[in-house]
Amino acid sequence: MRRQRRSRAFILWGVAGAAIAIVFGVTRAAGETELTRAYLDLAFDVAKTEQEAALAFSSMIENVEDFDRAAMIKLLEQLEEDTQGLVDQLDDADPPAPLQEGHLFLRIATTTWRSALSDARSGLVALADSPLDEDGLETLTRGLVDLRVGDSAYAGFLSSLTDVDTELQGSDPPVVSFVPSAQEGLFDAQELARRLFLTENLGPVQNLAVADLRFEPASVGEQEGLPVLAITPNQTAEVTISNRGNIPTAAIGVQLSLISNAGDLWEARQEIPLLEGGELTTLIFSDLPVKPGTIYEIIVTSQFEDDEDEDNTLSMLFLVNSEG
């Protein structure tokens, strides 16, 4: 009798163990599916943004004669900034094991596109000023080559998805090509130099712009549409000034104004000794006197009189958290 009970207990234990193993396997599979879905959401969002950037860049190259200098530089700066943001997102990603190779290809693509866009901007600006600028021609050539390298790395990312269930996203991954094969002939540095030389709107221009304004530490969220800053011993504003012209500019005054909702005004001023055409520089305004629970408007103004007024000022409303 005892033997029968023992045998029955072993059978029940075996059945229970098998059931637990099945449940564990199903749970693990579900967890891996969610990890895959989450990473592909990020990767596809990155690719979608890069697709839009690639279309904007190739359209600009195709129609460069329709651009003025400020618009061309502003677009290139924006594309470079957007791509930098995507690089930062991918650096923080943690892909599941089956997607690590694809993740590596995607990171190579985005970092290469970012540096390529920087070189393309520098080269185009230099050649718009002088089509015989050898350094500018070399820089643009390098940028155009690296754009193709980024395109190839992205093709590697797409190839890595062959055995991955991308139907989880409900759509195919975006196609990204900064240098479309159908327009290959347009992406030649010497040909672009010739076209720039024949375009009057890309001639000498003096234009200083407040290109970007960031906080450090960055905002921790939003409230009623306003970025919210945490209470910190030293709130800093990082201001990027761009010389969107092609004339070296000296003694550029930059003023920062901070106005609270109570009407309190705080101002600070810095000066940039020299900024070459097409270059960027970042100024650091430290120790902003912000108080908890207060709404502020921050206004940054380039005090240099130039050919373009619309981009001389950048402003933003923000709220300082009422708690630590």
Image (cartoon, rainbow, N blue to C red):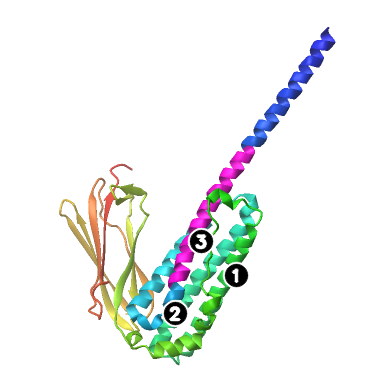
Which residue in the protein does label 2 denote? 62
* Circle 2 Cα neighbour tier, 10 Å, few/some/many (<14 / 14–19 / ≥20): some
Residue 163 visible at all: yes
- Tell me the kind of residue under disc 1: Ser
Residue at point 56%, 66% (across, down):
109
Label 1 sits on a secondary structure element that is: helix
Residue where numbered disc 1 is placed: 152
Q: Earlier in the sequence, mark 2 or mark 1?
A: 2
Where residue 33 sits: x, y (%)? 59, 44
First-in-chain label (3 vs 2) = 3
Q: Are marks 1 and 3 in contact (CB under 8 Å)?
A: no
Q: CA distance from mark 3 to mark 2?
A: 22 Å
Q: Residue at x 72, y 26 (%)?
A: 17
- Residue type, mark 2 in image: Glu
Q: Secondary structure at mark 3?
A: helix
Q: Quadrant of the C terminus?
A: top left
Q: Measuring 51% from the left and 52% from the top, which residue is drawn there?
A: 41
**Residue under label 3:** 47
Q: CA distance from mark 1 to mark 3?
A: 14 Å
- Measuring from the top left, give residue 183's x and y in whole percent: 51, 79
Indicate whether residue 47 is drawn in magenta. Answer: yes
- Observer able to see residue 92: no
Q: Which residues are magenta?
A: 28-56
Toward the viewer: 200 or 287? 200
